[in-house]
Image: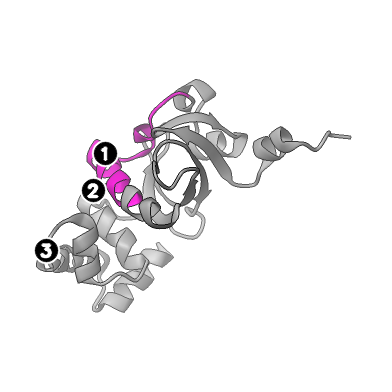
C-alpha cells in the first residue's frame, strides 16, 4: 500500500504541477515532466521561459499574468506551449499567487495538455498564437488590444490572417476551428 501524503499527491496528480518563485520552477511533478518530455534538470531551477515558443511570448504572457494576479491572485488561460523537443501544443494553464501583493514571488501552477482535443495544425506566428488564445477565451478586439498593448485595428488584421490560414468565414467559425484543431 502506498502512503498517501502531500508529496505523493503532488507527484502522482493527473495534471502537471509546478511550484515557482520569481518565475523559476522550484519543483514539478511527474505529469509535468511527461507532458513536456523533459528530465527534472531541464525544468527544475529553470525559468518558465523554456516552456514558451519564444522569449517575447514569455515576456508578454508574464505581463498579462502579473496584471491579472494583482487583482485576485489567480490566473488561467489556454496558450501554446513548447515541449523539450521543440513541439508546440495547446495547454491550459492556471495558477495562484501565494502573495497577491507580490504576484511573481511564489506561486502554484497547473498545466493540462489539450493536444488530444486541440491539435496545432497551422504554423502561427507568435502574435497570432497570442491572439488565437485570447479569441478562444471570448475576448473582443478591444479587450485583446488592451491586453497585448496594441490597437484593436491591429488585432483585426491578425484575426483576418488567422481566418485566411484556417479558412474561416467568421469569427465564431474561426474560434470553432481553433478549438477543434
- Quarter of the image for residue 164 reads bottom left
Along the line of sight, the residue nearer the viewer: 35 or 103: 103
Residue furthest top as drawn:
41
CB under 8 Å between discs 1 and 2:
yes
Q: Residues within 10 Å of mark 3 (few under 14, many from 20)?
A: some
The residue indicated by pointer 3 is 151
Mark 3 or mark 1: name the one nearer the start of the chain: 1
Query: In the image, which residues are magenta?
Result: 45-65
Q: Does residue 35 lie above or below 79 as drawn?
A: above
Magenta run includes residue 132: no
**Residue at point 37% right, 66% down?**
137
Q: Is residue 143 left or right of residue 153?
A: right
The residue indicated by pointer 2 is 126
Quadrant of the image for the N terminus?
A: top right
Residue 140 seen in render: yes
Q: Does residue 30 lie above or below 65 as drawn?
A: above
- Quarter of the image for residue 163 reads bottom left
Amino acid at each position: 500500500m502506498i502512503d498517501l501524503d502531500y508529496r505523493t499527491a503532488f507527484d502522482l496528480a493527473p495534471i502537471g504541477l509546478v511550484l515557482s518563485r520569481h518565475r523559476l520552477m522550484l519543483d514539478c511533478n511527474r505529469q509535468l515532466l511527461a507532458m513536456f518530455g523533459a528530465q527534472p534538470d531541464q525544468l527544475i531551477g529553470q525559468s518558465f521561459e523554456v516552456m514558451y515558443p519564444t522569449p517575447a511570448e514569455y515576456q508578454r504572457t508574464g505581463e498579462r499574468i502579473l496584471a491579472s494576479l494583482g487583482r485576485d491572485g489567480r490566473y488561467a488561460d489556454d496558450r501554446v506551449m513548447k515541449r523539450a523537443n521543440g513541439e508546440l501544443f495547446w495547454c491550459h494553464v492556471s495558477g495562484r499567487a501565494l502573495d497577491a501583493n507580490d504576484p511573481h514571488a511564489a506561486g502554484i501552477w497547473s498545466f493540462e495538455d489539450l493536444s488530444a482535443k486541440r491539435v496545432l495544425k497551422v504554423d502561427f506566428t507568435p502574435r497570432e498564437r497570442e491572439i488565437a488564445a485570447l479569441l478562444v477565451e471570448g475576448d473582443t478586439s478591444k479587450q485583446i488590444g488592451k491586453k497585448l498593448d496594441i490597437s484593436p485595428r491591429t488585432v483585426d488584421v491578425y484575426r483576418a490572417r488567422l481566418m485566411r490560414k484556417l479558412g474561416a468565414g467568421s469569427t465564431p467559425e474561426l474560434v470553432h476551428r481553433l478549438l477543434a484543431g
